[in-house]
Structures are given as C-alpha cells and as structure tokens.
Amino acid sequence: MATPKISPRRFDDSSFRYFSPGSLEEVVESHIRHLQRVKNALDKLPKERRGSLGLSENELSAIYRAAMIRFRDSAKLSEELREQRERFRETFNERLERFRKNSESEASHLAEMHAVLFAQQCDKAIGRATGDFADMLTQAVIARLGKKEFSLTRQKELWTECLKFAFGLAKFEIAGAWIDDAWGTDPREAPLPHLYTIETISDQQSAVERFAAKFRPRFESRLTMGSSGWLNEADHRIELRRLLSIAPLRRARANDPSKRALTRLLFESPNLTAEQICGRLDAKNETNHQNAPVPRAWQKAGTRSWIDAHEKFRGRVKTFISTVRKEAGIPYTSPGES
C-alpha cells in the first residue's frame, strides 16, 4: 500500500511569529496576537441575535462550557464511598468468588446501593456547579443590560436557564461520566470484578448493560429529587452577585427627573392606579417644588400638573407609567387602572 504524500505546510511569515516560551513579555505578546486573530475571524461572521437576557447563543454556550468543566473537575467521592472503594480493593478475591457463584444477585444488590450513594454525592456537585453557572450568567447579564435589578420575568428566565443547565448535568451520560471520574479505573476496584473472566466481549457488554439497567433508573430518580435544591443554590448565587455588582441602579433614567420621581413612587407604592400616581406626584411638587416635574412634552401641550395631564390625555399618561414600570421591573398586580 503506497504511503500518501503530504505537502509541507506553508507559513505566512507576515502572520506567523516564533517566540521564546521563557520570556514573559513574548508570551504575553503572542497571546495578544492570538486574540487579535480570533477577533478578526469573529468579525467576519454574521452578527448573532441576542436573547432576552442580552446574550447571544455563543456567549451562553461559553458560560455552559465553563460551568461544565468545573462540574467535571469536582468529581470526588464521599468518605463513605472512598472507604468502600478501598474495601473493594482489599476484598477483590472474595468479591470475585461471590460474583462467579451468583453474579445477578450480587450485581442487583450493588446497583441498588451504589445508585443511592452516588446520587447523593452527585446531587451536591450539581448544586455547586449550578451555583457557579448562575453566578457567571448573572455577571454576564448585568454587564449586557447595564443594571442589576431584574424584573420577575427576567428572574424567571435566569432560573429557567439555570435549571436547564442542572438537568443537563443530571442526564446519565453526563452524571455517569462524573461517576467514572470520581471512582477511577483500577480493575481491582471495579463494581463487577468478574467481567474479565467472561469469555466473549458481547457477554461482557451484556453483563454491564444488565447492571446499568438496574443502576440507572434508581440513580436518575434519586438525583432529580434535588432539583429544588439546585434552584435554591442558583437563586442564592444570583442574589449574591447582584449584591456585589457595581452596576448602576438606574442608568437609563439618570438624567430624566420625571422618570426618576415616578420610579421612586412606584417602588414605594407599586399598585397605585394612574390617577392615584398623578395625585401623589402633584403632592410631592407642592411640598418640594419641581421634585416630580411633569414631562416637558406634556408641558408644551399646555399641562401644568400630572392630574391635568391625566385628564387631557389619559392614554399617553398610562403608556408613560407602563414604560417606567417595565424599565424598572416593577409589576402591577391590582385589578385595572383608572
């Protein structure tokens, strides 16, 4: 069989540079050149649409990958499982003899016991990883939106994204890999010590599949019972990140005194009707001149008070209030506005 010819790779001297790995400055410069090449490549791609959280699919995927790596890195055993693994090693010959005599009974008992123990341990790892994911996601959303106060709708979107991540980790393909990483691959510690004594590969695979058929449903059932705990951990990390964030509270309304005054009132009394809001704002102006000025566009239309504006163009007033509510994330729960 002829060996295929491989053409030598040609480097463009203008874009390829050698650097000394022992030089701090040259390593940094090389990294900067790499980032610039990545940026140039990304700039040529079509722009992605951003979702309601302000993140593109690629950005969200990057957060998923980072949290997934932390989950895999966290693979470790509880003290009880570590002791059992050590006993498996010490009693390998005894276990082998038992499995040779009655492999189905031994495998069933082990599957039931290990399913619960591993689910308890993996449950905690998923909770920690979901918290890490929630923290990174919240940082990204705050950076994109420029504010750290979220409406209930946006909070639900964050919770949903965090639970999607957690349930992804709970899938047997992912959680099973975590188990493999935590337990290790020493054959003396294998759950099924008799596998190597089975003659054919197909029979070995059949034995593993029968063990998994007993282990998997019990493991997955026990593992998903932790979903409320995963969400609690995510919510805790979201609130902590919001507390630690230095994002401005009201960037979009910093220079609009009418919206600023309306926002303060809505935070104090979120369920007032439009007419009640206008009356309260006029009262503030009486005690503190122009503390809550009528919007300039309404003043140009001949209004001198909020109540006057409500009487002349009620629809515009309601739209204005609704817009501020939405920007501030303040829900309205009373039955209808007047």
Image: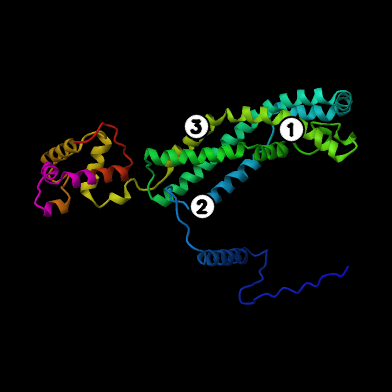
Label 3 or label 1, whichever comes before in sequence order: 1
**Type of the residue with mark 1:** Ala
Q: Nearer the viewer, residue 230 or 27?
A: 230
Cα distance between the residues tagged 3 and 1? 31 Å
Q: Quadrant location of the N terminus?
A: bottom right
Main SS, magenta residues = helix
User: Residue, x 31% and y 44% (percent of image)?
Assistant: 326
Q: Quadrant location of the C terminus?
A: top left
**Type of the residue with mark 3:** Asn
> Magenta span covers which residues?
299-320
Which image quadrant for residue 82?
Answer: top right
Q: How is the image coloured?
A: rainbow
Q: Nearer the viewer, mark 2 or mark 3?
A: 2
Q: Establish if 28 lies above or below 290.
A: below
Q: Secondary structure at mark 1?
A: helix
Which residue matches tag 3?
A: 232
Which residue matches tag 1?
A: 212
Q: Position of residue 201 (x, y in %)?
A: 86, 40
Cα distance between the residues tagged 1 and 2? 34 Å
Few, some or many residues within 10 Å of mark 1 (<14, 14–19, 20+): some
Question: In the rendered structure, does residue 305 fall within the stretch colored magenta?
Answer: yes
Which residue matches tag 2?
A: 57
